[in-house]
Image: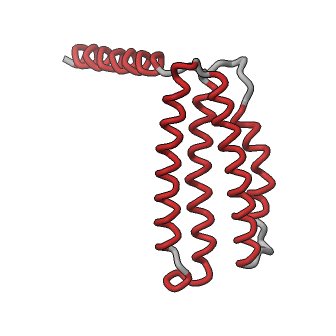
Amino acid sequence: MVKRSLNYMYRILLGCLFSISVIFGACAIDNPDAPDLFGEFEKREMVYLMAIDDPKNKTRDFLVAYNNYLLFLDKELNKAFSHIKLKLPNARKSDLITAQLAWLKYRDAEFKLIQSTWTREYFGSSAGISRGDYRTRIVKERIVQLLHYAKNL
């Protein structure tokens, strides 16, 4: 009886391992020869993150740091978009443009929500810091997604 249940358990374990290997085998494989666009982006953004994390920051310093970071992210977003656009065949470029325009509408709607919700009236002096954090996270997430696309093209 024990031998039969062990045999059954081994079959279940092998089935699980096989399923996992099939699932991971079907995932996209990164091109090892491709430049590390994400790593390069992280190096460039470090200056801005350090400015935000400066323990000497006052409220105004945080606001300036987040604004500078958002300007940097906007440039990086355009750079990532252009990089993908160059790699795509003409037939797919219009899909990319459509997706990016839809994302920009989403971003603008989110920014409007953030602006109207995190106000000084309800959140005090930390409202601006929260707004900066939320806005930069939205843009950074899109950049990361585009860089992952670029890596696999």
**What residue sits 63% from the left and 34% below the top?**
147
Left or right of 152, for residue 66: right
Q: Residue 152, position in %: x, y?
A: 60, 23
Tally of marks: 0
- Vertical arrangement, residue 11 with respect to residue 67, above or below: above
Quadrant housing the C terminus: top right
Quadrant housing the N terminus: top left
- Vertical arrangement, residue 6 with respect to residue 60, above or below: above
Left or right of 37, for residue 119: left
Left or right of 144, for residue 69: right
Q: Residue 37, position in %: x, y?
A: 71, 33
In the image, farthest residue toward the left? 1
- Vertical arrangement, residue 91 with respect to residue 69, above or below: above
**What residue sits 60% from the left and 77% below the top?**
126
Of 5 and 72, nearer the camera is: 72
**What residue sits 50% from the left and 45% below the top?**
103
The colour scheme used to paint the residues is secondary structure
- Vertical arrangement, residue 118 with respect to residue 24, above or below: below
Q: Residue 8, position in %: x, y?
A: 25, 16
Left or right of 78, for residue 135: left
Q: Residue 120, position in %: x, y?
A: 56, 82
Of 148 and 22, nearer the camera is: 148
Q: In which image quadrant can residue 125 be found?
A: bottom right
**What residue sits 63% from the left and 29% below the top?**
84
